[in-house]
């Protein structure tokens, strides 16, 4: 029994490839915190700098998801979500000092719903990863912010993006006895995460108008309080396994602190439309991360489905109204 547990713990230790990515990302984290925000780009390098930060942020998020999935054999998706949100809330607490926020009764209700949506999104997304490849789970989850963007625009051309998104979903639905389609329960979890992501965007905008970036820290703390009882009931004392602590901390950094910081720097240097367009390729990062770190090989039809959803998201971003906000990825 002890040998089996030791074998499980060895499987969740950082691999050299993952460790090297963490080191590179941490270097970019320090580099990306301090550049001046008011100086306009003067060269190709300065123009590409925020694009690079955004690409690194997306790679960081998906690498964190791959690392998180390696914790499932010990504490399950429920316990993994709990550990990630607890460590993420501590990090965000130190970075953003949310106690400075001045909350009214109305803004507090908005922040609570925002935090619960964030917690539900993380929980349902990790639940989907138990049976659905990472790239497909990200693509299905992306239908949430895509629906928000299309609803905010409501133009005739949006029917094209809706059609592309539906085509992508149909390619992922198993049909026929010989089909190698995805697990429907896992797909439902991912789509549920997409619904929570849509709520996260809607209530996050309202909460952000009241408390700015401190909203993110408040939301993560509420999400941790919302999900923690589920993880504790499911995993129990396994959550205190010493070998899990550095892994959970790595997940919190890769999936929350580092990408959030890089995205905030990139958002101040990129037009909203460009930011949203670049973020639309995140499902591809998820698929590649699953391939490299988890050996999740997708079929041609599944790659086509991911491509359809990416194109729908890019199209919705490019044709959205000028006053619409970009699809900012959630924690």
Image: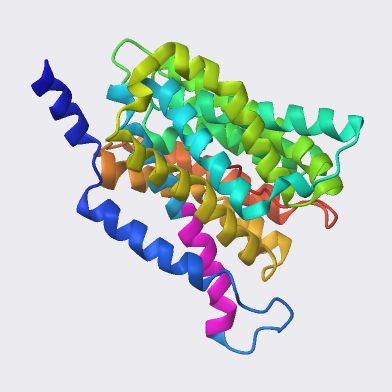
Is residue 175 at all visible to an observer of this figure?
no
Where is residue 35? Give x, y as percent.
61, 77
Q: Is residue 221 left or right of residue 284?
A: right
- Which of the pair 145/75 is nearer the observer? 75
Q: Is residue 102 above or below residue 230?
A: below
- Who's the residue at 50% across and 48% down the image? 282
Range drawn in magenta: 45-58
Residue occupying the far left of the picture? 3
- Who's the residue at 53% across and 22% down the image? 228
Residue occupying the far bottom of the picture? 42
Q: Is residue 47 left or right of residue 215?
A: left
Where is residue 111? Give x, y as percent.
77, 34
Where is residue 261? Give x, y as percent.
58, 58
- Report the coloring of the rendering: rainbow
On-image quarter of the N terminus: top left
**What secondary structure predominates along the stretch shown in magenta?**
helix
Magenta stretch containing residue 94, yes or no?
no
- Who's the residue at 62% across and 46% down the image? 93
When asked about the image quadrant of residue 219, the answer is top right
The mark tally for this picture is 0
- Which of the pair 159/260 is nearer the observer? 260
On-image quarter of the C terminus: top right
Is residue 289 at all visible to an observer of this figure?
yes
- Which of the pair 118/175 is nearer the observer? 118
Where is residue 5? Give x, y as percent.
17, 23
Magenta stretch containing residue 57, yes or no?
yes
- Who's the residue at 32% across and 18% down the image? 179
């Amino acid at each position: 029994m002890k040998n089996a547990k030791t074998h499980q713990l060895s499987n969740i230790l950082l691999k050299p490839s993952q460790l090297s990515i963490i080191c590179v990302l941490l270097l970019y984290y320090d580099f990306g915190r301090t550049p001046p925000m008011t100086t306009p780009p003067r060269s190709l390098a300065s123009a590409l700098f925020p694009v690079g930060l955004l690409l690194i942020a997306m790679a960081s998020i998906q690498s964190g998801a791959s690392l998180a999935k390696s914790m499932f054999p010990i504490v399950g998706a429920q316990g993994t979500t709990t550990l990630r949100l607890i460590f993420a809330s501590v990090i965000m607490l130190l970075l953003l000092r949310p106690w400075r926020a001045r909350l009214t009764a109305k803004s507090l209700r908005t922040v609570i719903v925002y935090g619960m949506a964030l917690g539900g999104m993380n929980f349902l997304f990790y639940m989907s990863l138990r049976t659905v490849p990472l790239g497909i789970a990200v693509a299905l989850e992306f239908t949430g912010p895509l629906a928000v963007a299309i609803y905010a625009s409501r133009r005739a051309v949006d029917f094209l993006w809706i059609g592309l998104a539906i085509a992508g979903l149909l390619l992922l639905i198993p049909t026929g006895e010989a089909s190698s389609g995805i697990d429907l329960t896992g797909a439902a979890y991912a789509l549920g995460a997409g619904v929570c992501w849509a709520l996260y965007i809607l209530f996050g905008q309202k909460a952000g108008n009241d408390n700015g970036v401190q909203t993110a820290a408040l939301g993560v703390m509420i999400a941790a309080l919302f999900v923690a009882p589920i993880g504790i009931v499911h995993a129990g004392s396994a959550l205190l396994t010493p070998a899990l602590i550095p892994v959970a901390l790595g997940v919190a950094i890769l999936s929350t602190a580092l990408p959030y910081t890089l995205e905030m720097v990139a958002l101040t240097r990129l037009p909203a439309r460009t930011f949203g367009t670049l973020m639309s390729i995140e499902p591809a990062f998820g698929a590649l991360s699953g391939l490299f770190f988890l050996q999740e090989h997708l079929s041609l039809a599944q790659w086509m489905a991911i491509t359809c959803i990416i194109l729908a998201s890019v199209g919705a971003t490019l044709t959205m109204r000028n006053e619409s906000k970009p699809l900012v990825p959630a924690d």
